[in-house]
Image (spheres, rainbow, N blue to C red):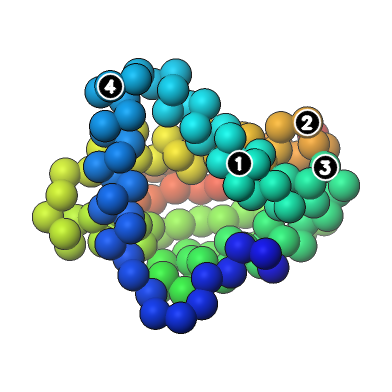
């Protein structure tokens, strides 16, 4: 897997991300934030995006499982031929931002929605991300 951080785990980057999201929206607008998230999904996670284009789910599955496990997220991941279902019961990013005493950006969970959509753009896959409440969501990747 290309996107595998190792070594000491520093969750404070979630706080920096939260602050940066607010800065971008306040100074450049929501369209700029959406464009950044789309570029992350297609460019930063290019090999996951290319895998989905080629109907190869392996790297996406490994990525989701690795990071939610590494950050001690409360989640379940189920994989079937035509569906990947990620149920996030407690998002480690949201939990850490709360521990830092920061107010969660109203746009914070938008990154998950937009990046998932970008990962699936121009592929045989689509993603429906349902935010049930802050820190709780369902991400369903299905074949189109």
User: Splitting the image into 4 quarters, where does residue 31 fall?
Assistant: top left
User: Splitting the image into 4 quarters, where does residue 95 fall?
Assistant: bottom left
SS assignment at label 3? helix
Give the left or right position of residue 5, taking residue 1 as reference. Answer: left
Q: CA distance from mark 3 to mark 1?
A: 13 Å
Q: Which residue is mark 3?
A: 53
Indicate the position of residue 118 as horizontal and vertical percent values: 63, 35
The tag on residue 27 is 4
User: Does label 4 or label 1 sit earlier along the sequence?
Assistant: 4
SS assignment at label 1? helix
Give the left or right position of residue 66, taking residue 141 as reference. Answer: left
Q: Is residue 35 above or below residue 13?
A: above
Q: CA distance from mark 3 to mark 2?
A: 7 Å
Q: Which residue is mark 1?
A: 41
| Residue in the foreground of this view, choosing between 47 and 103 | 47
Give the residue drawn at x 52%, y 70%. 5
Indicate the position of residue 6 as horizontal and vertical percent values: 51, 77
User: Does label 2 or label 1 sit earlier along the sequence?
Assistant: 1
- Bin the neighbour count of mark 3 within 10 Å (Cα to Cα): few under 14, some 14-19, many 20 and up: some
Q: Which residue is mark 2?
A: 122
User: Splitting the image into 4 quarters, where does residue 90 fall?
Assistant: bottom left
Q: CA distance from mark 3 to mark 4?
A: 34 Å
SS assignment at label 4? helix
State the quadrant of the N terminus: bottom right
User: Does label 3 or label 2 sit earlier along the sequence?
Assistant: 3
- Tags 3 and 2 in contact by the CB under 8 Å rule? yes
């Amino acid at each position: 897997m290309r996107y595998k951080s190792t070594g000491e785990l520093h969750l404070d980057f979630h706080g920096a991300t939260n602050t940066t999201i607010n800065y971008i929206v306040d100074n450049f607008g929501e369209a700029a934030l959406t464009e950044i998230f789309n570029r992350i999904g297609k460019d930063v996670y290019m090999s996951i995006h290319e895998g989905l284009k080629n109907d190869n789910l392996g790297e996406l599955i490994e990525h989701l499982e690795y990071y939610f496990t590494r950050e001690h997220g409360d989640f379940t991941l189920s994989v079937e031929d035509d569906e990947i279902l990620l149920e996030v019961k407690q998002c480690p990013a949201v939990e850490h931002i709360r521990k830092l005493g920061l107010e969660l950006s109203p746009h914070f969970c938008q990154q998950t929605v937009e990046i998932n959509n970008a990962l699936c753009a121009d592929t045989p896959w689509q993603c429906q991300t349902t935010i049930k409440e802050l820190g709780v969501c369902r991400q369903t990747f299905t074949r189109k």
